[in-house]
């Protein structure tokens, strides 16, 4: 049987995976990379470390699955989307640390552009908001603050792209400089209606168009790689997709009105809205879900900055837990949150509020509050934020979800999954496979390589999931949710 090798380069780690053509996970390995916080609100990654980690984890996985090497058809790639890398055209070496989607250093750039009246132009062309979450404001900061890098971009000796484009360039020895539509759509430089880099937007952010990658369909081929000698014969790179869209693809949300939430460091709620671009007026962004055989599928997205990151904060900064998995038992050990609400605005609040000045808070503490209440409030905050987004989507599309597909590392937290079903009042279908972003890229690669012919063929592949139905009485949910909304009002 043929197999697909996949690389999942996420915010916290780089994973290598092997899938068979039925979409079953055969094996996986992961290695974390260092998070750099040079100043409050700034977040960076070392692109060279990420590339070396990719080679290391792929090499180790191939070594222990050596018998499968001849059966590999392609390498598929999924990645953290808005994180941006500037690197040397000749060597491929990074010229600066990657500026991560979480990084807020582009806020003054956005404020100045909003003041100058560019917000609506950006929204109409890109479907996005003028926010430093996306790539271009951070690139503009880099051009302004690091003149040598700005000069290198202007003279074309440097290139700029999202993490997928950087990895493809390195893996193909500089032969392919390309990205896919799902990643290009996250930069604030790409017109998602015209499917092209936009000269006006690039001019606003001082990014020359010719330093940006070629944009291809996710199922296209992106050159050949031998992984710097790890493979005897080079593999096609085929199946490239940003992580959240890849998860939507893996959930087989091919029909308009179907949607999912990915629970990672942050969370992305994506709703397939079909063939026509719509500019949201209720706190969503519009993005490209995928392009297949020239046909665009669009999605509304609700971006949540901190979900898994909130639990990591309990562990790393407060020391309340030694392992994120402890939150499940802690939350279940108390009958309710005791009036405690945690607002995880560590990076401001995104959808549907979009208040970058909001700051995190724990509200409602009393002498009787325990770390169990705080842990429960942290998990509840994830579900409440998702409810906020789903309510806004339903109001805008007039199509409430009947099933919310869920994936990502936190789906293993049964308390969170049940509470999410209770709060949203819909069935939550939790994938038994956390690595759906990698699977989505691999399925896209299978289409590109002709292993499967159509998206309909993918629907018939086996899927494993757990269903959670709403159980908590609706009046209790309404009361608790009112408490959440009141708490959010305090930090806005």
Image (spheres, grey):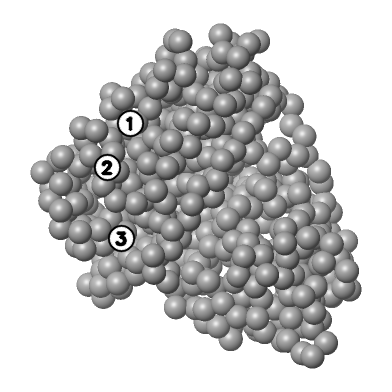
Q: Residue at x 40, y 56 (%)?
A: 44
Q: Earlier in the sequence, mark 2 or mark 1?
A: 2
Residue in front for this viewpoint, 423 or 319: 319
Q: Give the SS element for disc 1.
A: helix
Return the residue at label 2: 87
Q: Left or right of 84: which side holds 442? A: right
Q: Indicate whether 351 appears above or below 291.
A: below
Label 3–label 1 contact, CB within 8 A = no
Mark 2 vs mark 3: in front: 2
Quadrant in which residue 390 is drawn: bottom right
Mark 3 vs mark 1: in front: 1
Question: Which quarter of the rendering shows the N terminus?
Answer: top right
Q: Give the SS element for disc 2.
A: strand
Q: Earlier in the sequence, mark 3 or mark 1?
A: 3
Return the residue at label 1: 169
Return the residue at label 3: 137
Q: Residue at x 44, y 47 (%)?
A: 81
Image spot of residue 246 (x, y percent): 54, 38
Image spot of residue 455 (x, y percent): 58, 26
Q: Earlier in the sequence, mark 2 or mark 3?
A: 2
Residue in front for this viewpoint, 460 or 407: 407
Q: Left or right of 51: which side holds 434? A: right
Label 2–label 3 contact, CB within 8 A = no
State the separation of the CA atoms marked 2 and 3: 17 Å
State the separation of the CA atoms marked 2 and 1: 10 Å
Q: Indicate whether 137 appears above or below 207.
A: below
Q: Residue at x 55, y 45 (%)?
A: 32
Label 2–label 1 contact, CB within 8 A = yes
């Amino acid at each position: 049987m043929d197999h697909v090798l996949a690389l999942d380069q996420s915010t916290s780690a780089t994973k290598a995976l092997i899938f068979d053509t039925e979409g079953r996970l055969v094996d996986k390995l992961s290695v974390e990379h260092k998070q750099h916080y040079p100043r409050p609100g700034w977040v960076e990654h070392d692109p060279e470390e990420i590339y070396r980690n990719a080679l290391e984890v792929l090499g180790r996985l191939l070594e222990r699955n050596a018998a499968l090497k001849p059966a590999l058809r392609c390498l598929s790639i999924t990645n953290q989307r808005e994180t941006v890398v500037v690197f040397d055209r000749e060597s491929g070496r990074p010229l600066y640390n990657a500026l991560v989607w979480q990084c807020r250093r582009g806020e003054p750039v956005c404020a100045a552009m909003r003041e100058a009246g560019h917000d609506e132009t950006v929204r109409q062309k890109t479907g996005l908001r003028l926010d430093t979450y996306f790539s271009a404001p951070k690139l503009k900061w880099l051009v302004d603050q690091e003149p040598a890098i700005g000069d290198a971009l202007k003279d074309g000796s440097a290139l700029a792209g999202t993490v997928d484009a950087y990895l493809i360039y390195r893996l193909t020895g500089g032969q392919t400089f390309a990205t896919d539509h799902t990643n290009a759509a996250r930069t604030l430089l790409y017109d998602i209606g015209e499917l092209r880099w936009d000269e006006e937007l690039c001019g606003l952010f001082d990014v020359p168009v010719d330093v940006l990658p070629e944009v291809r369909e996710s199922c296209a081929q992106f050159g050949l790689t031998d992984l710097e000698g790890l493979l005897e014969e080079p593999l096609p790179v085929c199946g490239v997709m940003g992580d959240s869209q890849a998860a939507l693809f893996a959930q087989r949300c091919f029909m308009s009105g179907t949607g999912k939430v990915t629970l990672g460091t942050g969370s992305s709620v994506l709703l397939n809205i079909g063939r026509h671009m719509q500019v949201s007026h209720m706190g969503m962004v519009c993005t490209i879900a995928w392009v297949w055989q020239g046909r665009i599928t669009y999605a509304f997205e609700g971006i949540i900055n901190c979900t898994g990151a909130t639990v990591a904060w309990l562990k790393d900064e407060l020391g309340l837990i030694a392992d994120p998995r402890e939150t499940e038992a802690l939350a279940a050990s108390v009958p309710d949150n005791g009036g405690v609400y945690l607002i995880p605005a560590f990076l401001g609040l995104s959808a549907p509020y979009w208040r970058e000045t909001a700051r995190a808070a724990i509200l409602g503490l009393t002498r009787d509050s325990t770390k169990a209440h705080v842990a429960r409030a942290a998990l509840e905050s994830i579900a409440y934020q998702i409810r906020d987004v789903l309510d806004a989507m339903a109001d805008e599309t007039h199509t409430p979800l009947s099933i919310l597909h869920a994936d990502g590392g936190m789906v293993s937290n049964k308390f969170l999954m049940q509470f999410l079903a209770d709060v949203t009042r819909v069935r939550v279908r939790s994938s038994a496979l956390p690595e759906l972003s990698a699977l989505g890229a691999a399925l896209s690669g299978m289409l590109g390589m002709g292993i499967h012919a159509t998206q309909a063929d993918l629907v018939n592949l086996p899927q494993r999931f757990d269903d959670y139905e709403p159980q908590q009485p609706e009046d209790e949910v309404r009361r608790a949710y009112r408490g959440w909304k009141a708490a959010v009002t305090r930090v806005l």
